[in-house]
Amino acid sequence: MPYHIDNDFSLQTTLKSLHILYIEDDASIRLTLTKVLHYFSNVVLAVDSAEEAMKIYDSFQPDIIICDINLPGINGIDLVKWIRNFDDKSQIFLLTAYTDKSYLLEAIKLSLVDYLTKPIDFTVLEKTLKNAARKVIQYKKVNVRFISGAIYCYQQRNITFHEKIYSLTAKEVKLLDHLIVNKSRMTSKEELQSTLWEDAMGSESAFKSLINKLRSKIGKESIENISGVGYRILLA
């Protein structure tokens, strides 16, 4: 059965672990967009040519490829043709200033996720990356390991810890996803409660119970808590 991601937090947490390969020969544009891509993923590799992308392809194993079409030497279309000879799973889209329909038609034949024109709109880029993540999750097992050694499997929505498998409730998944998306900062109790219960703020006892149950499944040390400040997930 296909795995479906139905909420924005799950898409963000999935994207964080995916490998993004970005090919752009313009150094200024490459630097700027690489910074933007790091907002979505923890694993971004930017190179300046198709030839360089070919060299590191096997070792990097990209899930999403973003490629400028007008590259010196081997161009973007020919790079995608090369990739599709052995990899039909990676999600690819081209960035270009071209509006020529012949380029668009050829790109469609190569099973691209999208075809975007420069300058790149952040909202469109975000939508495209999330669409790519939805497709990647259908064939790739995406796991997150916590400092305790516990492993969270996105597809199965379960935790493996000390050789036992623990299922997660909908609230536990929502809490965990929110903490992972915001892993670089402390998240306040009020923010978490608002996320978990939306319109109706959950009681203090219900919140504490949820935190404790999740800690029992992923290891107490995996969720850091500073009284009066908030909570933070600790990844391995």
Image (cartoon, helix red, strand yellow):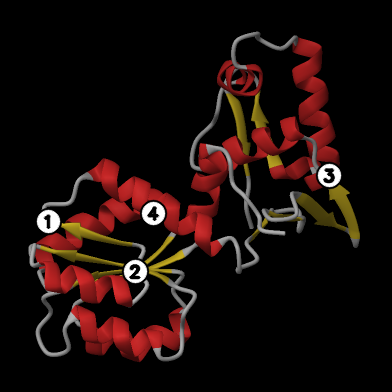
Residue toward you, 107 or 194: 107
Residue type beneath disc 2: Leu
Disc number placed over residue 186 in the picture, else none: none
The mark closer to the camera, 3 or 2, is: 2
Task: Report the mark closest to the observer, 3 or 1.
Answer: 1
Q: Which residue is drawn at 29% across and 50% down?
A: 125
> What kind of element bears circle 2?
loop
Q: Are marks 2 and 1 in contact (CB under 8 Å)?
A: no
- Asked if residue 166 lies left or right of residue 71, the reply is right
Say which amino acid is labelled 4. Leu
* Precedes in sequence: disc 4 or disc 2: 2
Judging by the rendered image, the residue that carries numbered circle 4 is 129
Q: Residues within 10 Å of mark 3 (few under 14, many from 20)?
A: many
Distance in Å between CA atoms under marks 3 and 2? 39 Å
Secondary structure of the residue carrying tag 1 is loop
Q: What percent of the width, then of the height, locates residue 225?
A: 67, 30
